[in-house]
Each structure stands twice: as C-alpha cells, then as structure tokens.
C-alpha cells in the first residue's frame, strides 16, 4: 500500500489528513515528547505516518525506536522528510557504510542512528558458556 503515497516521479510527498484517519491516537500528546516503537521498519511508512499524526495532535517532538531497521526502497528519504527527530535501531541488519580517508563510517541518514548489540550478545554467550542465567540480560 506504500506505493499509493509516492509521487509519480518516485519522490516522497507528505501525508494528508485524510490518509491519517485510519490511525487511532489514545491520550493527550499536546506539548509532549513522543516515542514510537515498532519492531521493524521496512518502508518507513508506518512510523512517518504515526509521527505526522502525533505532530498534528500537538506533540512537541517525535522519536522512533525499532529493533530491526531494514530501510527498504526510499525509506531513508521518507524518514529524512518526516516529522521524526531521530530513529534509533540496533545493528541486527547491516546498513550501508563507506570509507573516507580510510575511516569506515555509516552514511545512511542524518536522522537514523544504529546501536550495536555486540556487547549484549557477547554477555549472553559468556553466561551460557558458564552455565549462568541469561534472564537478567535486558
């Protein structure tokens, strides 16, 4: 369904109020910072649509957190042009990198930030190896 929201040229346009009517907002967000959580961001349609709905309802700032950031197609462009301040994901799905002057850097978006799960996985492996509980990991 994301295809209907693209311009014929392939660019991204803003959500209209009519397109936001299918989303329910519970509670008062007027003047508040809001956090959207989604387990997976693929095209970015859900989180950018939710962010627009929150801003129209008076939210001060809108952030998004996701476990798996796939960012397919023009998702990064959609996020860049959205009401979102920042999108944070973990590195369960590798994102594009580049090397400038021999330094590896992430170049995907000014708004998308990726956190590493390496320390968490290392600690889980250590605990399993020592036959200790992993239920305390969070």
Image (cartoon, grey):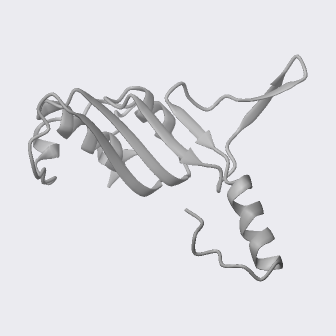
| Nearest the eye: 51 or 74 | 51
- Most extreme residue toward the bottom, as rendered? 131
Determine whether 27 is above or below 113 in the image: below
Determine whether 18 is above or below 122 in the image: above
- Looking at the rendered image, the quarter that the N terminus falls into is bottom left
- Looking at the rendered image, the quarter that the C terminus falls into is bottom right
The percent position of residue 129, horizontal first and vertical second, equals 83, 78
Along the horizontal axis of the image, is 107 left or right of 67?
A: right
Residue 27 showing in the rendered view: yes
Q: Residue at x 75, y 73 (%)?
A: 127
| Nearest the eye: 63 or 48 | 63
Residue 43 showing in the rendered view: no
Q: Residue at x 10, y 42 (%)?
A: 18
The percent position of residue 107, horizontal first and vertical second, equals 66, 28
Determine whether 2 is above or below 114 in the image: below
Q: Residue at x 69, y 49 (%)?
A: 94
Q: Residue at x 61, y 32 (%)?
A: 108
Q: Which quarter of the figure has residue 68?
A: bottom right
């Amino acid at each position: 369904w994301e295809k209907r929201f693209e311009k014929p040229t392939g660019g991204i346009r803003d959500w209209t109020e009519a397109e936001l009517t299918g989303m329910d907002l519970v509670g008062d967000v007027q003047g508040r910072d809001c956090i959207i959580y989604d387990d997976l961001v693929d095209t970015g349609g859900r989180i950018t649509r939710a962010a627009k709905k929150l801003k129209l309802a008076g939210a001060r700032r809108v952030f998004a957190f996701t476990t798996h950031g796939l960012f397919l197609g023009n998702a990064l462009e959609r996020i860049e042009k959205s009401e979102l301040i920042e999108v944070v994901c973990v590195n369960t799905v590798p994102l594009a990198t580049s090397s400038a002057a021999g330094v590896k850097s992430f170049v995907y978006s000014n708004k998308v930030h990726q956190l590493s799960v390496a320390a968490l996985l290392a600690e889980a492996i250590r605990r399993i190896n020592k036959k200790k509980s992993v239920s305390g990991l969070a």
